[in-house]
Image: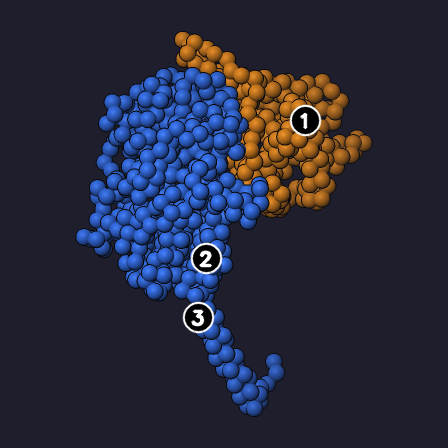
Chain colours: A orange, B blue
Amino acid sequence: MDYFFIVVLQLAVTIANLALVSIGLAIVFGMMRVINFAHGEFLMLGGYAAIISNRAGINLWIAIFLIAPIVVGAVGILLERLVIRHLYGRMIDTMLATWGISLALIGLVTVVFGNTVSGISPPLGSLTVGRYAIGNYELLLVAVAAALFAAGWLVLRHTSLGLIARGTMQDREMSAALGIDPSRVYAATFAVGAAVSGLTGALIAPIVGVVPTIGAMYIAKAFITVISGGVAILAGTLGSSVLLGGVNTLISFVFTPVLGEVALLAAAVVLLRLLPQGITGRFFRKAL
Amino acid sequence: MVTLSRRRLLELGAAGAAAGITSLYGRGASAAETIPIAGIHDASGGIDIYGRPMINCLTLAVEELNAAGGVLGKQLDLVNYDPQSNMQLYTQYAGEAATKQKAAVVFGGILSASREAMRPTLKRYKTLYFYNLLYEGGVCDRNIFCMGSTPAQTLQKFTPFVMKHFNGKKIYTLAADYNYGQITAKWIKKFATENGGDVIATDFFPLDVSDFGPTIRKIQAAKPEIIMSVLVGANHNSFYRQWVASGMKDKIPMASTTFGIGNEQVLTSPEEHNGIIVSYAYFDGIQTPENKSFLEKYYKRFGEKADAVTEGAAMTFNAVNLWAKAVAKAGSVDHDKVIEALETGLSFTGPPGKTTIDPRTHHDTLDVYIAEVRDRKYNVLESFPQQPPADTAAFCDLQAHPNENKQFVIDVKT
């Protein structure tokens, strides 16, 4: 019974991890069809921002929830202004440009901070379930993921900002005709996507640690999750996170973590073969 | 296109020939003055935590020899190659050092995979090779000298010590998924079983894995009494962090064969590493006069914030000096003569103490220490002086079979 409960908690943690890592990319790709290969580096920058500011004496929670998103959001605005803005609609070119940006960011961080940085220990202790235990910090991640998705849904559904964003996403020309400036909406969306990625990077930093190349670990999974999710940003990402994260965890428990990763990728292949438009291309089409 | 007159063509031809001959002369002249040697260690990428201290000690040893007049009256010309934690570059640089630089000796290799990538190349080009980091034992090859500690020297005493220290018999092994991790896991199983213990499970992790969540739950389910960590590289460091986050730190004690070789005690916090037991042939807290004066020189040369000296780095220092001794004894840098000189059982006393080459295995007899990690420092608990490389000696006799060229692996199922 304890074992079942701990498996459920671990499932929630893995799914939340996957959802958090992918949501930043989902916002950028889903709203603007921009393939952002620098997404992993946004995660990495968020992690570095949190660790560096924490070691400079700032409270850990402020560093994670305030500083990291602001820093990476600013980087996102800069990049959007300088590079992405000129390449809307040109998917291959944005791929190339963001790939170059990712390499440049990795190199820059390596030069400034070196290859390894001492990390921060995860705070908050652990939850004991019978003879098992799980870190409270990991459970916090689940709560943050849920809050983020809830907040996203509220903004998109019930605020005028959300309406403007959805409108611009559906039909750029028509929104422009109705008096909305699409380029400002796009800039704001990219900044929000970057800020969310920064927050995620900061959140996973105490668990995983930061090295300059940590982005490479997550970019593949993020892309797979976003594409398998389909058109809807929130529902799609949530759906594919549940499916892929669930498969990953269960196989990891039964066999080994390596096979868990293999299973995740195999599941993604099968999913895309059966539902080429992603999950929300077929189910929950009207969802956000 | 300007048409060349015959006179112009002859002028250009003569100038070209003259330049060519002079450059030959120039190179020839400088080659007679210095001895080229090569260092191939990762200075960047995830494995640089192991490489940087080794590069420092290599540089220090060479500079010291050069300041004392060099070897055979010639200065040593050290070139440090950086394979950037990429196996392809190891093979490439080994070839370059052997053929383009014509190095008299190569000091390098960190992961066992990198050693096995370079060994055949360097043997083919008959370039002497020193591999200085602890590893899983068993290499039998006359072209290489392995200076690092091997399982018979460390693990054989370490495993029963850990079982007694933590009063436990059931071990759960976590190992990196490549040759070093796989073979060391076999050795742990062998020594644990010999001492009445039992390895209840072994899990292998590729070097880029950093999510150990499901594994930690599996460990909780299996309820071992001791965790044995054979994890390698910066990504695996997150295990120690996640272990503490799960609240397991005080429930199950841990020992490791790799923690500290990359100065992990600096990268992790005291609550993550206090109490871990490790065993190596060198700790920078050893109180011998050689080590103290060495550390003074080291920090003066590289600054107070330099990477701490690890076993690999200290053995590199000894290796360079042993090579220099052999060259002086042989009277030349010729490959076969230097090997014969080393095979007379040369020894050198440096920061890790006295290391003596064993001619039958091309490994060395060295001092072994067992220590506990606490607050970023190592407290030595026991020491075993002058341990011979018994594991490789059981399979390998290079004096009887000088053409042997393989790595022996013990046959234990994990």
Q: What amino acid is found at the position of numbered circle 2 in the picture? A: Leu
Q: Nearer the viewer, residue B207 or A101?
A: B207
- Pointer 2 and pointer 1 on the same chain: no
Q: Which numbered disc covers residue A58?
A: 1
> On the rendered image, what quadrant is the C terminus of chain A found in?
top right
Q: Nearer the viewer, residue A160 or B231?
A: B231
Q: Is residue A26 visible?
A: no
**Helix, strand, or loop for circle 2?**
helix
Q: CA distance from mark 2 to mark 3?
A: 18 Å
**Residue B377 % position (x, y):** 49, 31
- Pointer 2 and pointer 3 on the same chain: yes
Q: Which residue is mark 2?
A: B65
* Relative to B189, A72 lies left or right: right
User: Quick check: A211 above or below B381?
Assistant: below
* Dot 3 crowding, Cα within 10 Å, few <14, some 14–19, many 20+: few
**Residue B37 appears in which quarter of the rendering?**
bottom left
